[in-house]
Image (cartoon, rainbow, N blue to C red):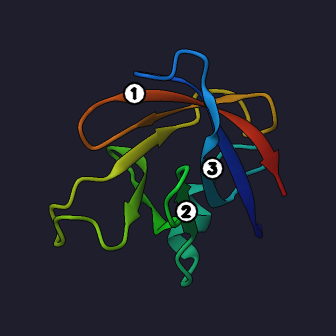
Amino acid sequence: MAAVTVILALAAGPGFPQGSPEHRYEIELALDAGGRPDAAAWSADPVPWRARRILPGAEPLPGDVQHDPDHGWSIRFFGAPTEGPDVPETRFDCGPDPVRPGEYVTVTEPDGAEFVYRVVGVG
C-alpha cells in the first residue's frame, strides 16, 4: 500500500493544556486495510518513511519513521544532540482506532513527557 502523509497537531500535554496547532508532526505511513500503520509495509519498503517535527519559530526537524515489533513506532530525528545507535527516539502510539482525522495519537518524547496529538489530515 502507498504511504500517506499524516498530519498531527498538539491537542494537549505538559505546558499546553489547550494544545497548540503550531506544534505539529508530519509523518509518512502506509496504512493497512483497517487504517492502522502497516508494519509489514514498513519492513518491505526500501525507502525510509519521512517525518518532520514542526515547532513555532524553528526550522522543521527532519527524521524518519522506525518500527520495532517489541516497542512499536517511533521517529528518529537527524542531527539529534546525541548520534549513534542509542540515540533516544520519539515514540508514537496510534491506539486501537484507525488513523483518520479527529482521532488521537500519543507522542512520548525522549525525556518521557507524553503529549496528545490530534490527527488533522491524512492524504
Residue assigned mark 3: 37
Residue assigned mark 2: 52
* C-alpha distance separating marks 2 and 1: 18 Å
- Residue furthest to the bottom in view is 46
Neighbour tally class for label 3: few under 14, some 14-19, many 20 plus, Cα within 10 Å? many
Labels 1 and 3 touching (C-beta < 8 A):
no
Q: Kindly identify the amino acid type of the residue bearing the numbered disc 1.
A: Glu
Figure quadrant of residue 19: top right
Tell me which numbered mark, 2 or 3, is placed earlier along the sequence: 3
Figure quadrant of residue 44: bottom right
* C-alpha distance separating marks 2 and 3: 17 Å
Say which element carries label 1: strand
Tell me which numbered mark, 2 or 1, is placed earlier along the sequence: 2
What is the x, y in percent for residue 113? 32, 29
For image coordinates 50% across by 69% down, the residue present is: 43
What is the x, y in percent for residue 26? 64, 56
